[in-house]
Image (cartoon, rainbow, N blue to C red):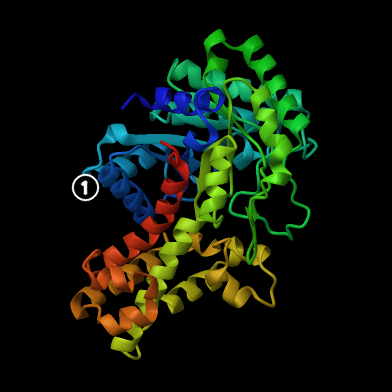
Amino acid sequence: MPDAASFLLALARQMHDPAISHGRRRGIASVCSAHPFVLEAALRRAARTDTPVLIEATCNQVNQEGGYTGLTPDDFRERVWSIADRVSCPRERILLGGDHLGPNPWRHLGANEAMERAGVMVEAYARAGFVKLHLDASMGCAGEDPVLPDDTVAERAAWLASRAEAVAPGQSVYVVGTEVPVPGGTQEGMDHLAPTAPEAARQTALVTHDLFTRLLAPDVWKRVIALVVQPGVEFGAEDVELYDRPRAGGLVEALMTLPGLAYEAHSTDYQKPADLRALVEDGFAILKVGPQLTFAMREALYALDAIANVLKPGRRSLRDVMEAEMQADPSNWRTHYDPARAGWLRHYGYSDRIRYYWAKPAAQVAVTALVTELNDTGLPEPLVSQFLPALYERLRNGQIASTPEQIVMTAIDDVLDAYAGACGPVEG
């Protein structure tokens, strides 16, 4: 396998190769999660299929101050590598990325201080060996307008790139662009959602190119691989906006005027497999997915919890533990859901706000206890059929082991499998 930077550069360049038809275009899923179960499923797939795996951390999740996971970039890398070593996934198969790297965690501060902290964060990611860096300086800081001029955003992105280059010259490839969906799904209705205007995509690329070439070494822009744009896909608490190919036609055509660049699509969770494939064929080489992976994990854990409730009536359920944790600290879900429906949405909503609670000590203890209980009792086939019908035939046929751990891994892997199918060429 070529090194990570070369692999990602080639992925972008193929979008402009006239010898490669749309049906032969390749993409890669970007696994955006720090949960150990999700990381393990992704790394097991990479080891099993002998393919690269792209794993990304966000600025709020992982930074030099710990982020909401308590992990620095070094810590996150060590978590990934530790799991990889355990499941026999070669480290050279792993591509690490940083998402939304910019002043967002400190935007309540003045621009100078917020950008300085963002610069320290970018250096920490680069030093830790993260190769793919999405530079996102699009948000205004204290005293600034919420939406900044293109040249200000581009200048700040170039400055952040200079911080990465200072500590790891020539190591990183970059993703730029300002039209980024709200991380974790939108809080509003989605009837207003529209693909990025073609001229807006071209303008962002042009202004960023000018600032990069003016402020940085000539080779740095050559390592910019993708532009984040909105293809018209999104998810909220209860709804998913599916990819509308004709509606995005102008944006897709605009890519041919952006030599060397691919598009990166955020919030592709819950798209149909055919829509994911259409995105790749239309130039979206990088498909971000995160909440759908922990959504699938939660579905499997809650199904296992239901089985345990049948086998041991009166036990305290995992769902009860998670409800107590979310009630004790509603900050991660209260503003995201209609109060009239929040009771079920905080557990089952597409936006998967429950994912912020799996790292709580009580949640970890409850998950461990559930797995231990079911390893002791076994998983009766009729109950698997009742609560896990999508996995029943595979378990019965011996395709997957009848263990709670394997059930959870398979549920996550089924989502990853849809992305793998979409990202591989469909023509020979």
Displayed quadrant of residue 180: top right
Q: Is residue 329 left or right of residue 375?
A: right
Q: Is residue 84 left or right of residue 28?
A: left
Q: Position of residue 333 (x, y in %)?
A: 60, 64
The one of 245 and 402 positioned closer to us in this rendering: 245
Q: Is residue 34 left or right of residue 178?
A: left
The one of 91 and 357 positioned closer to us in this rendering: 91
**Which residue is rendered at x = 23% and y = 48% of the image?**
87
The one of 325 and 317 positioned closer to us in this rendering: 317
Q: Is residue 338 left or right of residue 310?
A: right
Visible in this render: residue 22? Answer: yes
Disc 1 is placed on an element classified as helix
**Which residue is rendered at x = 38% and y = 75% of the image?**
389
- Tag 1: amino acid: Arg
Displayed quadrant of residue 177: top right
- Vertical placement of residue 95 versus 279, above or below: above
**Which residue is rendered at x = 54% and y = 40% of the image?**
280
